[in-house]
Image (tube, rainbow, N blue to C red):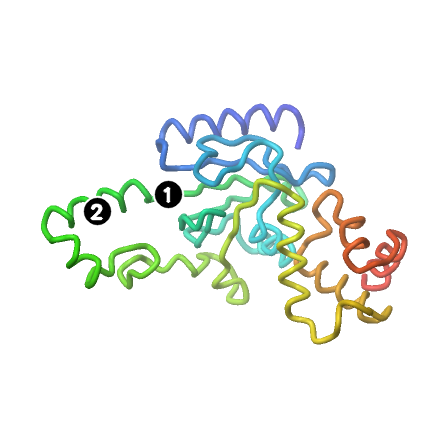
Amino acid sequence: MTNLQLKQFTSLVKFLSQVLGPDYEIVLQDLSDSHNCVAAIENGSISGRKIGSPITDAALRLLKKRVYETTDFVANYKGVTRDGIVLRSSTFFFKDENNEPFALLCINFSDARYIELHDKLLALAHPITFLTKHSTHTIQESSNIPDFLHLANVPSESDNITETFMADTEVLMEDIYNNVVSNVDFPLERLTQYERKKIVELLREKGIFKLKGAVPFVADKINCSVASVYRYLGEIK
């Protein structure tokens, strides 16, 4: 992303935040190889992120699956903050002349204030004991909350993605790694070369190597050299 693009898109982020209001987090993510992080953000308190925070796990998966080749955006899918707050999220792909994305514009809506208002209105009509026993209106339990698990305009294999927002790249890499190794059927204490290569392949599919510092992170996790990880990646490609 050029300096001019960064300036223009940062202004767009500020514009959208003022138009939509405080319940909308507006985020610009730079996809440059040297960045892959939040370049501009408004109302970042919603997810707890700031400039420099890493790209999300869902964005990594969308990029890995090259969803942008068949659509310009994905709308109204489920996002979850580290505090467990459910958001309605949407992502727009900024693409170059080769149809390759160089930045993402993400909008995350939080209905927390409306849920709180809803609770207060119900409390005026019902005793608290009744609500505790019978109410099903909370985010966690309600069958009436819209299903944001379906990604509009995304191929079926990308349905049911849940996005988790991380404020720190190391935490995101740790989360991706733990998710991958929890599904392997071999002991992590004494990995063979084949097993190390398999873990690298699975991590590559999750897009972890788009994150800065991923190669030494993975090398440390699977107890091998940085050169070995690069060799595995070369063999997988």
Q: Quadrant of residue 111?
A: top left
Asked which secondary structure carries label 2, the reply is helix
Near mark 1 (Cα within 10 A), the count class, few <14, some 14-19 or many ≥20, is many
| Residue visible at 46% across and 51% down in the picture | 79
Quick one: 130 or 91, which is closer to the camera? 130
Above/below status of 126 relative to 200: above
Q: Quadrant of residue 3?
A: top right
In the rendered image, the quadrant that contains the N terminus is top right
Q: Quadrant of residue 17?
A: top left
Near mark 2 (Cα within 10 A), the count class, few <14, some 14-19 or many ≥20, is few
Question: Dot 2 corresponds to which residue?
Answer: 118
| Residue visible at 48% across and 28% down in the picture | 12
Instruction: Give the farthest residue toward the left.
Output: 125
Can you tell which mark lies on residue 228?
none
Question: Dot 1 corresponds to which residue?
Answer: 110
The residue type indicated by label 2 comes to His
| Residue visible at 18% across and 57% down in the picture | 131
The residue type indicated by label 1 comes to Ser
Residue 154, percent across and down? 50, 59
Above/below status of 76 relative to 183: above
Above/below status of 170 relative to 160: above
Residue 20, percent across and down? 36, 33
| Residue visible at 33% across and 43% down in the picture | 112
Residue 56, percent across and down? 57, 47
Residue 150, percent across and down? 43, 61
* Position of residue 164 in the picture relative to residue 2 (left or right): left
Tag 2–tag 1 contact (CB < 8 Å) = no
In the rendered image, the quadrant that contains the C terminus is bottom right
Quick one: 158 or 67, which is closer to the camera? 158
Q: CA distance from mark 2 to mark 1?
A: 14 Å
